[in-house]
Amino acid sequence: MNFILRCLGILLVIACLTACSSVIVPEQTVENKVGDSIGGLVIAEASLQFVTIEVVGTRTDALGGVLPGRIVFQPQAMMAIGSPVVARILSIGVRPGEIVKTGKLLMTLQSADVAEARAMLNQAAARNAAAEDLLKRQNEMIWKGVGLEVERFSAETAAREARAELERAKHMTALIGDGKGDRFVLRAPVEGVVLDIKASIGSVVSPGGDALVEIGDPGKLWAVADIPESEISHVAVGQSARIRVLATGTRLDAIVDGIGQAVDGEQRRIPVYLSFKEEVGHLSSGMLAEVRLSTTGNNSLSLPATAILIKEDSQQIVYVQRLDGSFEPRPVRTGNSYDGRVIILEGLQAGEKVVVKGALLLDSTAEQLL
């Protein structure tokens, strides 16, 4: 009886081994799905469904990826108004956000220096009148033959000095502005919007300090985009762009007006300045924006980022499908990326077929560029 049971056990083990061997066979087929074909790799028909192939072509998208940006005033669009002398603010004639015309009264101030400057102007005018009168008499005496040339020359020198002193006094009072006595007013030198008032009634201000009033021209705005320094070589003055202002949803056309030279030490980005092609009076400085630079002019090739594989930590390759259906690895050099696509600078030509999905099935030792 024991002998019969041992025989049955042996038969059972043999049956199990036979069943297991029948399961392993398909797995071996999967492992051997890739073979060689004159230097290329051939993939099994069953695995082709997991591979996506794309024909390489020039970039057809007109705009690149989204870049962070903001709306700012152009340098020539802002005017900071301060006091030319030490003075006390008596009244303020405008409020933030107010639209002002050129010559609009902004503030009235009081200063002892202003009273002194106006007194000096009156004295200089009086001395100039006396010097001019003396020179006139000396010229008349010379003409009549009773005057001395040395006295006429002395009178001419004194008149010249008096004129220069009068001009200096006029220039000083012109910087102060109009008014009477020890009071003077600050007026808007340009038309625009009052951006900020940094003073209060009764406060004492000094020349060279903070601006008392800031005025900006709402029609002269820039968009500033922050470009990664690794991609700045693909940006050029005159390049087209599309800007979306987040606060209003407005979409505007622009061009690159200038490229900054300083790199942000933390984010490693460079500012790029864009001027609008249309009126933007409805926008405000400080608004956030999305910037998309035109890439059509680059005439470059591009592939999805999933097509790029990394070999040996640094080498970038793609798998190109040959005419016989096999695949060959091809080293490439890549540029900047937009919206999940990578620009190909070297290694491919337009019209070639490249594996853009499932490339790891061809090379399990590589890593994917994501």
Image (cartoon, rainbow, N blue to C red):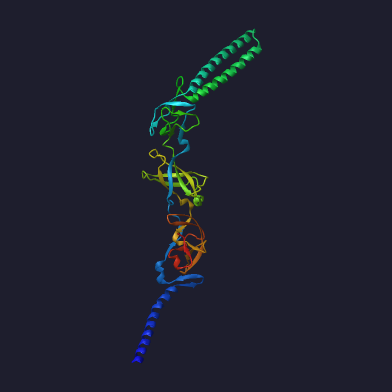
- Give the quadrant of residue 198: top left
Q: Position of residue 188 (x, y in %)?
A: 43, 29
Q: Position of residue 95 (x, y in %)?
A: 38, 31
Q: Position of residue 203 (x, y in %)?
A: 43, 28
Q: Position of residue 23 (x, y in %)?
A: 38, 78
Which residue is at the front of the view, 64 or 177? 177
Which residue is at the front of the view, 236 or 181? 181
Instruction: Name the quadrant of the C terminus.
Output: bottom left
Residue furthest front as drawn: 2
Residue lying at 53% horizontally and 15% vertically, measured from the top left:
126
The count of marks equals 0
Residue furthest left as drawn: 1
On the rendered structure, is 51 left or right of 154?
Answer: left
Residue lying at 63% horizontally and 13% vertically, measured from the top left:
152
Q: Is residue 212 above or below residue 353?
A: above
Q: Is residue 317 above or below residue 150?
A: below
Residue lying at 63% horizontally and 7% vertically, measured from the top left:
144
Instruction: Name the quadrant of the N terminus.
Output: bottom left
Q: Is residue 225 above or below residue 211?
A: below
